[in-house]
Amino acid sequence: MNCKEWQEELALYLYGDLPADRRAAVDSHLASCGQCRETLEEGRRLHQLLAARPLREPSPELLYECRHALGEALDHDDLGWRGLLRGWSSMLRFAPASGAVAAVALVVTGFCMGWALRPRTGMVAPLVVPAAGTASVSEPDLQNMRINGISRVAPDPKTGEVRITLDAERRMTLEGSLDDPRIQQVLLYAVRNYNNPGIRRDTLDALRTRPDNPNVRGALLYALRHDPNAGMRLEALNAVRGLDWGPDLRQALLDALEHDTNPGVRISAIDLLSQHADAEVLPAFERLAASDADRSVQLRCARAIRELAKGDF
C-alpha cells in the first residue's frame, strides 16, 4: 500500500474504529513513515481544536422551519426518502465492518424510515374537487364524530377558503370559509389538540386571517401559551400581532415573557409589549432587566426601558 491508501484509514484509526489487525498494520506503517505520522498529528490537532469550541445548538424555531421546508420539498421529490432508503439498504450489504460506517448507516436508515412513515404535514394546495373516496359532511355529523387524524389544512390566501382533509369514521374533505362552523370546529380542535406541528402551523395560517373572531383570538392566545413546540409558539406570537390590544393579549405576552423556555419567544414578546407599555409592563421589564438568568433577555428589557424613556417606541 502507498501512503495515500494508508492515509485513507487514518481517520478511522484516530477515532478507534479500525479492527485490531488493521490497527496493528497502521501502527507498523506509522513507525517507519514520517509523512503519515505528520498527517495523523494534523488530524489530532484539528480534532482538539474542534473539541475546544463551544457547541452551538440550533434554535427550536430554526429546526422547525428547516424540517417543515424539508418535508414539503421531499413530498414533491420523485424519489423521496423511500428511494434514499432503498439506496442505503443496498449499500449496507457491502459496507465494511467498521463501527463508524455501521453507526452512520443505522442513523441514516432510521432517519429515512421515520420520514417515510411520518404523517404528511399540510401542504398549501389549490382548492380542488374532492377525490374519489372522500365525502362531504354536515355540521351535525361532524359533532357526533371523533376525529382520528387530519391529513391536510390548506388555506387559500386569495379566496379565504380553507380545505381540510381528515379521518373520522371515514375519509372526508371540508371546504369553506372561516365563517363555516364546521371549518371553525376542526381548526380550533387542531390548534389545541393535534400532535402534528405541521398541521398546527397550517391551522394558524388559516386562523390568523380572522383576528376579530373571539374563538380564533382564544385559540391564538392558547397556542402562544401552551403549544409544546417553541417554533409554533413563535408563530402564534407573530399571529397575535394582528389582534386588537386588550388585557387578555397583554397577559398572554407577559406570561410568555416571564415563563417561556425559549429566548426567541421571550424577546419577541418584549418587542410587542414595548409597543403597548403600561403600568403592568414596565415593572416586568425592570425586574427582568435586573435579575433574569438569560443575558439576552436582560439586555433586551434594559434596551426597551431606555427607548421607552426616550419615547422612541
Image (cartoon, grey):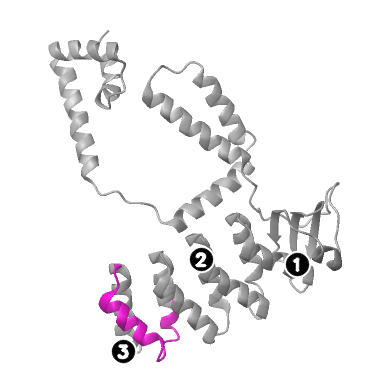
* Helix, strand or loop for disc 2: helix
Q: Are marks 2 and 3 in contact (CB under 8 Å)?
A: no
- Residue under the point 85% across and 47% down: 133
Viewer-closest of 222 and 152: 222
Picture quadrant of residue 114:
top right
Look at mark 3 in the image and give the residue it sits on: 309
- The percent position of residue 189, horizontal first and vertical second, equals 68, 65
Q: Do the residues labelled 2 and 1 touch (CB within 8 Å)?
A: no
Tell me if mark 3 has few (under 14), some (14-19) or many (20+) residues whose alpha carbon lies within 10 angstroms of its own: few
* Helix, strand or loop for disc 3: helix
Q: Residue 83 carries which label?
A: none
- Residue under the point 55% across and 51% down: 68
Looking at marks 2 and 3 on the same chain, the residue that comes earlier in the sequence is marked by: 2
- The percent position of residue 64, horizontal first and vertical second, equals 50, 54
- At label 3, which amino acid type do we have? Ala
Viewer-closest of 211 and 223: 223
- At label 1, which amino acid type do we have? Ile
Q: Are marks 1 and 3 in contact (CB under 8 Å)?
A: no
- The percent position of residue 190, horizontal first and vertical second, equals 66, 62
Look at mark 1 in the image and give the residue it sits on: 183
Looking at marks 1 and 3 on the same chain, the residue that comes earlier in the sequence is marked by: 1
Q: Tell me the quadrant of the picture where the C terminus can be found.
A: bottom left
Look at mark 2 in the image and give the residue it sits on: 233
Decide if residue 187 is on the left or right side of residue 98.
Answer: right
| Magenta span: chief secondary structure | helix
Picture quadrant of residue 38:
top left
Which portion, as a residue range, is magenta? 272-294
Picture quadrant of residue 23:
top left
Tell me if mark 2 has few (under 14), some (14-19) or many (20+) residues whose alpha carbon lies within 10 angstroms of its own: many
* Helix, strand or loop for disc 1: helix
